[in-house]
Amino acid sequence: MMSIDDKTREAAGFLSKELKDADRTGIVLGSGLGGLADEIQETKVWDFGEIPHFPVSSVEGHRGQLIAGSLCGVEVLAMAGRVHFYEGFTMKEVSFPVRVMGAMGVKNIIITNAGGAANSRMTPGDIALIEDHINLMGDNPLRGSPDFTDLTSVYSDTLKELARRAAENKGIELKSGVYVGNQGPSYETPAEVRMARIMGGDIVGMSTVPEVITASSCGMSVLGLSMITNMAAGITGEKLSHREVIATTESAQEEFKTLVREILALM
C-alpha cells in the first residue's frame, strides 16, 4: 500500500509535468462558489478523476476540477469544488488536494465555504472572515503521524488584514467570526447551534477544518472566507435545504468574486 507521502509525490509530479514553474496561490471554492474559476485565464483544467489518488465528489454545486492559470495577475491553483468528510472519505482523503498543493510549493491559500449563521448578527448573503475554528468533526487529518502542528495562528493575521483592506477598497461589509466544523451531512439541530454559540462559534459548516489543518501542517498561510447562505437551525424556525445553500451563493457570489479578486490584486 502506498503511503500518503508517496501518493502526494505522484499527484504533484503528474500536475507539475504540465505546468510552468511559478509561485502559485491556492484557492478552494466551496458550494456554489465555483463561478470564480471561470475567470481564470490561460488555464489548464483537470477533472479530479484524472489526477492520481484525487478523491471525486458527488455533491451538487461542486464541479470537481483543479484549475491552474492566472487571476488578477496572480498565478493560482484553484479547486472548483471539494470532497467532504460526510461523503465517507477519510480526513486524509478530504485534505489530500491541499497536501498536493503544498508539495507543489503553494505558500498562500484561500479556503472558502458556504456556512450557516449561528450568530444573528449575520444574514444570508454576508461574507465572513474566519478568525478561528472549532473542530467538532471527531477526527483530524494529521492522525496517525507525530505531526504536532501549532494552530495558535492558523488563520494568517497578514492575510486577514489584506482581506479587510480589500473589502474596504470595494465597499464590501466583511463580517468575521469563529467557524464550527461539524461532520454532517445532516444540518445541526437547534440545540447543537445553541451549543456552538455557547462555545464561541458564529458560523457552522461541514468542511474547511481538515483543509486548514493540513495547509498549516504544510507551512501554508491560510485565509478563510465563509459565504453565509442561511440562518442555522432554530434561529428563524425555517427548514434548511442544500438547494437553498446553492441558490444563495449563486445570487450573492458577485460580491464574493469581487472581494477575492481584490485580495489577489493586493498580494
Image (cartoon, helix red, strand yellow):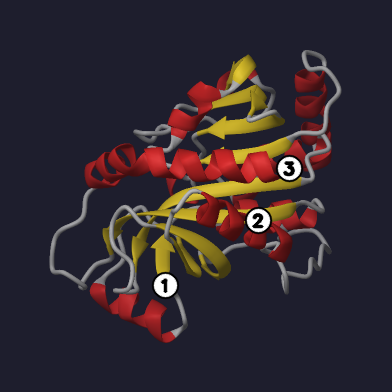
Q: Is residue 77 left or right of residue 231?
A: right
Q: Are marks 2 and 1 in contact (CB under 8 Å)?
A: no
Q: Are marks 3 and 2 in contact (CB under 8 Å)?
A: no
Horizontal and vertical percent for residue 230?
Answer: 27, 57
- The residue labelled by disc 2 is 162
Q: Amino acid at mark 1?
A: Asp
Residue under the image location 61 percent in, 32 percent down: 78
Precedes in sequence: disc 3 or disc 1: 3
Q: Choose mark 3 or mark 2, whichever is in front.
A: 2
Asked whether residue 209 is in view, the answer is yes
Q: Which type of secondary structure does the marked residue at label 1 adopt?
A: loop
Q: Choose mark 2 or mark 1, whichever is in front.
A: 2
Precedes in sequence: disc 2 or disc 1: 2
Closest to the observer, 181 or 19: 19
Residue under the image location 78 percent in, 56 percent down: 217
Q: Amino acid at mark 2?
A: Leu
Horizontal and vertical percent for residue 130?
Answer: 54, 63
